[in-house]
Image: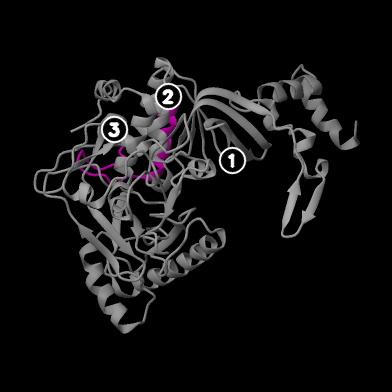
Amino acid sequence: MKKSDKGTDNIFKRLNFGRRTFLKGLIATGVGGLSGALFRPDPGMASGGTTLQKNGEFVIEQARKIPIIRDVDILVVGGGMAGVGAAVASGRMGLRTLLVEYFGCLGGNGTSGMVNNFCGYTTSGPTRVQIVQGIGGEIHRMLLERKGVSSKTSFTFNPEILKMVLDELMAKANVELLYYTQMIDPIIEKNTIKGVFVANKGGRQAILAKRVLDCTGDGDVCASANVPFELGDGLGGFLACDMAFHIVNVGENFKSSTVDPAAAEAIRSGEYKITRPQAIIQNIMIPGAYWVNWAGIPWAVNGLDPYRLTQAAMDGRKVVRDLRRFFRDKIEGMENADVIDTAAKVGLRETRRVMGEHLLTGDEVLQGTKFHDGIGACAWPIEIVDPVKGRRYVNLKDGDFYTIPYRCLVPQKVENLLMAGRFISCTHEAQASARVMGPAVVMGQAIGTAAALSIKRGVSPRDLNVDLLQQELVKAGAFLG
């Protein structure tokens, strides 16, 4: 024993168990019941155990053994609102469900991205109907009970309360969580997905699953499995992305209606770096604290390019710095306002659109199409947010909605793989409607339910009887139209 270890060993003696007993227990149980393989990577996983050969512009890595840390029924990749809906739905149906997430919390853009408002929860017009029910509606009710939203008709939320609500939902649904974990590659046998490779502080690991649900926001699992996809608008353009942030010390006399006129004048003068004329500023249920969705990145960002994404994050913080100066100089009630934090990730609206069994179009959205295999409703307008020109809405008729076909959630070519979220099978215009958090949790609930049903019925998700899926969703409180 090293001299420096003696003090620690004495602690173990006082607790009536030895150092070896403690370490064996730690390795055997891990944290939260996860395998000890997380803490003791196989020697073949370390760089020192791998011989690398340089071949032109590539490095060739020798084959290595990857430990299998889990073998589950359903693996959900991504913990945004789509992943939340998927994992809770499958967990409640009694299937062994594991959700892996890159950040340390659930909620995706709603928490890590600081977009603190549930868009797409209701129809438009004077008489609004809440069409996001089921798990999405339950989340809203839990937030209301905990004063995370202000009322039954408010969808702006406190993100810290949302984090805790979502953790609680997972625990009650018996969903196992693995945070701080990145999906690396799918495990494919012939044309069937069998699981994924992941990486985290424990090294590389394999997770096997009967069904894999891609809720990554960018379609990472599908793309890595060679499912066809389109990128952005198909012409090199992308919907704008933002650096959302929180401000505090806002006075009671602040009125959000005063911001846009002052911003228009500031844009004309060029005195401040304001990249978009329309500001979204809403209180997050804390006196004097607001979330701001206004720091637009003034160029088209390909969110799949890590170097462009890095530059976007830095540019976004520069815009935030100038907006703080503008608030203090020009807006009544914000004389002492300060930025308390910026989002952990840039708020992307669009990257991939993965091709499925049906391609949802802008015309189908605006016509309020009700599909025979609809698994939930959406009424959000086609919201085109251009990096330079700003925001433009094309609305559905008041009170109308369209339904999202199950076929849009079934990727081409690969079996036992489903998808939900902003990258589903749709055109650039339709994606500008279906991309928001309300329909995301609806789609998530649908694929979690479909995955569970397909296992119980012994069929591929592609061949699942949609009538059975719709019946199960209605039973769980979902709104299908």
How far apart marks 1 and 2 lie (CA) works out to: 21 Å
Residues in magenta?
Answer: 147-173
Q: What element carries label 2?
A: loop
In this view, 119 is above or below 11: below
Question: Pointer 1: what residue?
Answer: 185
Comparing 333 with 97, the one in front is: 97
Amino acid type at circle 3 is Glu
Question: Pointer 2: what residue?
Answer: 460
Comparing 245 with 477, the one in front is: 477
Q: Quadrant for the C terminus, please.
A: top left
Q: Which of the labelled discs sits on residue 145, or is there none?
A: 3
How far apart marks 3 and 1 lie (CA) works out to: 40 Å
Q: Where is residue 89 in the image (x, y as percent from the top left)?
A: 37, 26
Q: How is the protein colored in the picture? A: one colour
Look at discs 1 and 2 and give the one toward the viewer.
Answer: 2
Let me know if residue 119 appears in the view: yes
Q: Is mark 3 on a helix, strand or loop?
A: helix
Q: Which residue is drawn at 44% across and 19% down?
A: 455
Badges 1 and 2: C-beta atoms under 8 Å apart? no
Amino acid type at circle 1 is Asp
Let me know if residue 254 appears in the view: no
Q: Position of residue 192 (x, y in %)?
A: 52, 30
Q: What element carries label 1?
A: strand
Look at discs 3 and 1 and give the one toward the viewer.
Answer: 1
Q: Residue at x 33, y 44 (%)?
A: 437
How far apart marks 3 and 2 lie (CA) works out to: 39 Å
Horizontal arrangement in the rendering, residue 382 relative to residue 294 (left or right)? left
Q: Position of residue 168 (x, y in %)?
A: 42, 29
Amino acid type at circle 2 is Ser
